Amino acid sequence: MTRIDIKSEREFLREIFEKIQKGIYAIPVFQRDFVWTSQQVVDLFDSIWNGYPIGSLILWQPDVDMLSKDILSDENITSSANPQYFVLDGRQRLSAFYGCVQNSRPRDKKFDLYFNLITCKFSFRNVETVTNLKVSDVYDTFTLLSKMQNIVTAYHHDEVKAKQYVESAKKLNSILQGYTISEVFINNCSLKQAEIVFSRINSKGTEINKTFMLQAVTYSKGGLLLTEEIENIKKDLEKYNFSSLSSDDILQCFYRFANKDFYDAKMSDLENMDFSSQLPSIKESIIQSVKFLYNDCYVWDTKLLPYTKQLIALTWFFKEHNNLDLIQIAELKKWFFYTTATQAFQNSSLSNVRKIFRRFEKYIKEEETTAIEYSKFARIEFLDFKFNQKNAQTDLLIISMIRSAVVSGKNDNMAYYGINKLKNGKMPQYYFACLSVNDKEELTNFMERGSSFSKDTLDRLCLTPDTVSAYTNKDFKRFEDLRYQILLKAEDELLSEVGLGSENSIIILT
């Protein structure tokens, strides 16, 4: 591997601006999009105003042809532009600076930054006045001249203020034109080496996700944009409310298609994978897995998936088995709810993950009749259970509520609309899975006005007339006891349905 040639120098931001205008510096097509918030943009300009360092730019001269994308819109550039360097680190800062100071093209609101000459503060308050100027107008010296004349005219009766505001404008122009930043140039650097640099640069600070990094090292092999393909998969998952899966979560499902285990493999193991030929199969396996979770396990939203590792395992199964019989469906359901109820992947060690997946592999290969070795598992009583949508116990409880509403057979067209909570309690008994567009409103009306519920709504929310009466009469202890029994029954019925009934578990009273 050729040794990377690195050199550094300082350069004015205005000169970097010109190089971007001329296409000398560009954003590589595999770079992540512009994701900074308005506050981060304000902080950048505040740092420049106060003379604070804003970090360095790392510019890369690749050894292969590379497409670029627009620094403001993130759209791919199809022209014959031939940039000398690509921005490997500092893209967010450059886009923020360039977007806010340029005047040569229409400006998106996310770059419509203003500078208040009275307070000397930056903001996105979208009102231009004599003393609240667009940063782009202050940056452009010729435009600034007319703005300063407006100040003098508006404050002709108060020369002190006129001078103060003019000086503030001139000072910002001078700072923006004179601010320098360190540039690090990386030459003789392959895509493989760029991956290493990319990773180590971002080992601290803003994390670059694995999908973008893998895209960087695979792009030259056919020009496939991995991020776009994953976004297409997410669009197909929208009907199951799974489009919010992270790109990295989806990427982990790819590993088995390269005959690698996600928990042991390195990203480099995917470099030689033929994504173009594998993508239809990968996409189909992921969709089938999510469809199974949605239809058979009542996981009606990404937020209700206890562990991403469950999705990875199921994707692996559907890779090898296209048409499931009833016995396989029943076993996968049992495996899913067993790993959920036992919190199998909660802070799980790598050795335990290997053990679970290796047994699962034997089931896939039909070397075992079950996907895991089942044993009795402990369940903690609800009264001491902390409701938190980031743990498997909560997910199991919500899924149990959904199943209970579904099997009641009295509610059509249900969907998951999130969680709502009654006042006066923090325990799980006070939480509800809203399965109708009106559920949250009805719960709010009940709390604030004592409104009643229809029979269908009671069934859907896992309530009874007795629980409603107890809450209305502020007998919260009775409400908690009654709803505890309802929720416990809902979960018991779910676990019994998949073959994990009370004989398989032990209730631990705390």
Image (spheres, grey):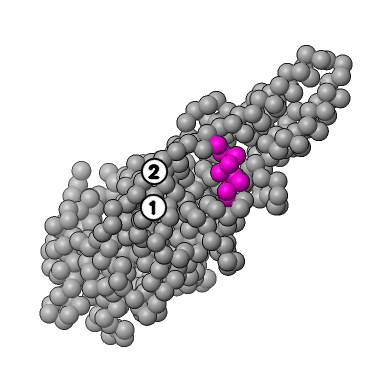
Q: Dot 2: few (<14), some (14–19), or many (≥20) neighbours within 10 Å?
A: few
- Give the camera-side residue of 411 and 453: 411
User: Which quadrant of the figure contains the C terminus?
Assistant: top left
Q: Amino acid at mark 2?
A: Lys
- Residue at point 53%, 26% (across, down): 51
**Disc assigned to residue 7:** 2
Q: Dot 1: few (<14), some (14–19), or many (≥20) neighbours within 10 Å?
A: some
| Residue 77 screen position, x and y as percent | 57, 64
| Residue 194 screen position, x and y as percent | 35, 55
Give the total of numbered labels.
Answer: 2
Residue 47 among magenta residues = no
- Residue at point 18%, 71% (across, down): 360
One can see residue 387 in this view: no
| Residue 31 screen position, x and y as percent | 46, 56
Q: Amino acid at mark 1?
A: Asn
The CA span between labels 1 and 2 is 8 Å
**Viewed as shown, does residue 280 lie left or right of 456?**
left
Whether 436 is drawn above or below 25: the answer is below
- Residue at point 55%, 53% (across, down): 24
- Residue at point 20%, 77% (across, down): 364
Residue labelled with disc 1: 187
Region in magenta? 12-20
Residues at marks 1 and 2 touching, judged by CB atoms closer than 8 Å: yes
Q: Tag 1, which secondary structure?
A: strand
Q: Tag 2, which secondary structure?
A: strand
User: Which quadrant of the figure contains the N terminus?
Assistant: bottom left
